[in-house]
Image (cartoon, grey):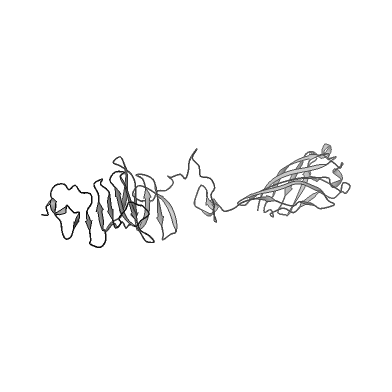
Amino acid sequence: MTKARDLADGTFSGDVTVSGNITSTGIDDNATSTAMTLDSSGNLLVGKSSQNQAVEGFEYSGASKYMYLTKGGRVSAYFDRLTSDGDIVEFRKAGSTVGSIGTNGGDLFISNSDTGLRYRGVEDNIIPCDGSGGSRDNAVDLGGSPYRFKDLYLSGGVYVGGTGSANKLDDYEEGTWTPTVSSGSATVNKATYTKIGNLVTIYADLRSFSERSSTDSVRINGLPFTAAKRSVGAVMYRYMSDIPTNGSIVAYVDSVNYVHFLSNGGIGNWRGTQYADLDSASSILAFTITYQI
């Protein structure tokens, strides 16, 4: 056993066995450089000679109760669990476990006692998991009310309500389109569309029609997407002479790239709205239709 007086100068070499406590201003090892320092405040430095978190080495502050492990340009620490899956690092608050980082089936997981994320490199995905990294299905929400994420950027689709191909929502788009009339010209006050999956909703407001005498049916060309099925939409109109006789007007799309307008005044047959029905320079046709593509 090395006696306390042998450590009085703070320098030693070889093995040291101590019984009881040592009070010292420092312990230095290695004749050419300091390998470890333990001062009277309980500050421990290994591989460094001063307290500075930016300097490589290990540092523990006995006074402030913090610890730094710093390495430049390389891994700072390794944690290796052998032979079995489970927690590798455990985090506690006031003695109680609040979460862990571990491995399950060769995958890394981060979790508390109930909810976490498991990173699956083989399948290139991240799945919800329980406290031991086991997968959980249809149990974990992403965000909540009133704690929401902001924007979600995806290059693929979202499966809503199921995992089949029919549940995949793979497109959302908003924009403007350019309606044109089949005869003459008209002023487009506004024309927009919204596309969600295979459903497109269009809106347009046309006025100042130059053609108001022809018996040709009014058709609006230039749909942003060609319709796959028949669809009927609502129309707001102004100054239309045909309305008292043939009833209200509906907008109509049928596997074509244009909108036409039909009316029925209870006479048993549809009648196409004609340019001659636009009996005023102030005539307006505004319509909205949702159709499949």
Front-most of residues 246 and 52: 52
Q: Is residue 228 left or right of residue 66?
A: right
Question: From what the image shows, is residue 97 above or below residue 182?
Answer: above
Residue at image location 25% in from the left, 56% down from the top: 36
Residue 108 position within the rendered picture, expressed as x and y whole percent measured from the top left? 37, 55
Point 77% across, 48% down: residue = 260
x and y percentages locating residue 17 in the rendered image:
13, 54
- Looking at this rendering, what residue extends furthest in the front direction? 9
The answer to whether residue 77 is above or below residue 204 is below
Which quadrant would residue 115 be assigned to in this image? top left
Location of residue 241 (image quadrant): top right
Which is more toward the observer, 190 or 240? 190
Instruction: Return the x and y of residue 29 as percentages of the image width and height.
Output: 22, 58
Q: Nearer the viewer, residue 138 or 249?
A: 138
Among the 4 quarters of the image, the one containing residue 98 = top left
**How many discs mark residues in the rendered view?**
0
Q: Which quadrant holds the N terminus?
A: bottom left
Q: Indicate left or right for 74 with 256 as reference.
A: left
Determine the residue positioned at 11% across, 52% down: 3
Q: Give coordinates of residue 177: x percent, y percent.
A: 72, 51
User: What residue is drawn where x is 23% and y is 56%?
Assistant: 28
Q: Residue furthest right?
A: 213
Relative side of 84 to 277, left or right? left
Question: In the figure, 53 relative to 64: above or below?
Answer: below
Residue located farthest toward the left when viewing the structure as drawn: 1
